[in-house]
Amino acid sequence: MSFPLQRMRRLRVNKNVRRMVRETRLSVDDLVYPVFVCHGEGIASPVEAMPGIYNYSIDKLLEELEKVVALKIPAVLPFGIPAVKDETGSEAYAEDGIIQQAVRAIKKVYPELLVITDVCLCEYTSHGHCGILKDGRVLNDPTLELLARTAVSHASAGADMVAPSDMMDGRVAALRKALDQHSYENVPVMAYSAKYASSFYGPFREAAGSTPQSGDRKGYQMDPANADEALREVWLDIEEGADIVMVKPALAYMDVIRRVKTATGYPVAAYNVSGEYSMVKSAAQMGRVDESGIVLEILTGMKRAGADIIITYHAVDVARWLKERV
Ligand code: PBG
């Protein structure tokens, strides 16, 4: 059947018809809001490269989260800025580490807000790498034990879900085993499965002070040129017990999101990372693009590609825009 019997424009004729045939719907239910938290009191210091994003002390973070809860955003992903960094990133798994304190405080005030914790060492190590460094190399197997300790300490502080982002081999199995041994068998693992060695993390590293002091992360994060390999990473994580798999970054990796969703049928998270956020913010501040239009289009694209969950610094704005839009 073709023109004039078939006229594609008939179903675009007005807003209500378009609403009826819309295939993809972005919802507040899809969103996870990443936040930065530091020691101290009364602190809300702007992250320069990420307009609208702040580094909060716990008291200020709790104030900010009132908005998040009121907007019905289901989950937050706190990143900690430690007081001191050392060779083995000990504040990552310290009982009174910044994340452990933040999680306890959040769960006390907002028991229903899901708290997902990022399990990695890079914010906590003096060298800025995601594991134990020896002779310029990140050691895989000795790092696993520290990651497992970190995850258990998060769970015991009340974390609802843990998200390993280090890209060591075997970390999902190590976390799952340690969590189960400590009776946290109901704490899911959202694995940063296909995490690329990306230039899009620049603003985050400024915020978290986690830029590697030497070398780069190409020895453990994925080559942006590879997609078949992403599927192997994802399947390995699933075999090791991952409940949700993640593709990160998102914008330049829509094909990977789609392939992972189609191949596995697992819940897929897409991380709309700091550099993606900063690009949009900069262009919007210069008046070059319409911010809400462009953000909603990008996130809808991620959903259309197959993402079930979108981790985004735009979450609060998006939740507001979605409320206003019919
Ligand atoms: C920790 C971690 C990073 C991000 C999330 N978890 C930084 C990195 O791998 O360098 C980046 C998030 C973002 O850019 O928004 N490993």
Image (cartoon, rainbow, N blue to C red):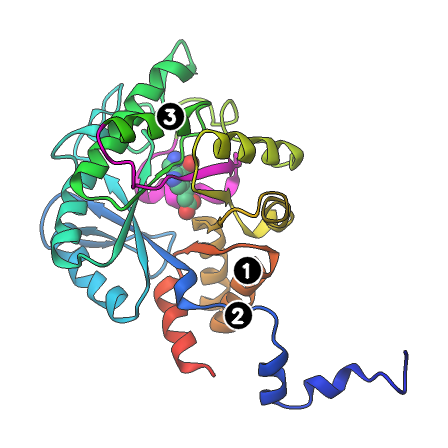
**Pointers 2 and 3 in contact (C-beta within 8 Å):** no
Relative horizontal placement of residue 96, taking residue 311 as reference (left or right): left
Number of marks in the image? 3
Q: Which residues are magenta?
A: 182-211
Mark 1 surroundings within 10 Å by alpha-carbon count, few (fewer than 14), some (14 through 19), many (20 or more):
many
Spatial CA span between label 2 and label 3: 38 Å
The CB of the residue at mark 2 lies under 8 Å from ligand 1: no
Counting residues from the N terminus, which is met first, the one under dot 1 or under dot 2?
2
Counting residues from the N terminus, which is met first, the one under dot 1 or under dot 3?
3
Numbered disc 1: secondary structure: helix
Front residue of this view, candidates 6 and 54 = 6
**Pointers 1 and 2 in contact (C-beta within 8 Å):** yes
Residue 25 numbered mark, or none? 2
Spatial CA span between label 1 and label 3: 31 Å
Residue occupying image coordinates x 55% and y 60%: 303
Compared to residue 78, the image places residue 26 above or below, namely below
Residue bearing the label numbered 1: 303
> Residue 19 location in percent, x, y?
58, 82
| Residue 189 placement: quadrant | top left
Mark 2 surroundings within 10 Å by alpha-carbon count, few (fewer than 14), some (14 through 19), many (20 or more):
few
Residue occupying image coordinates x 31% and y 26%: 147
Residue 119 numbered mark, or none? none
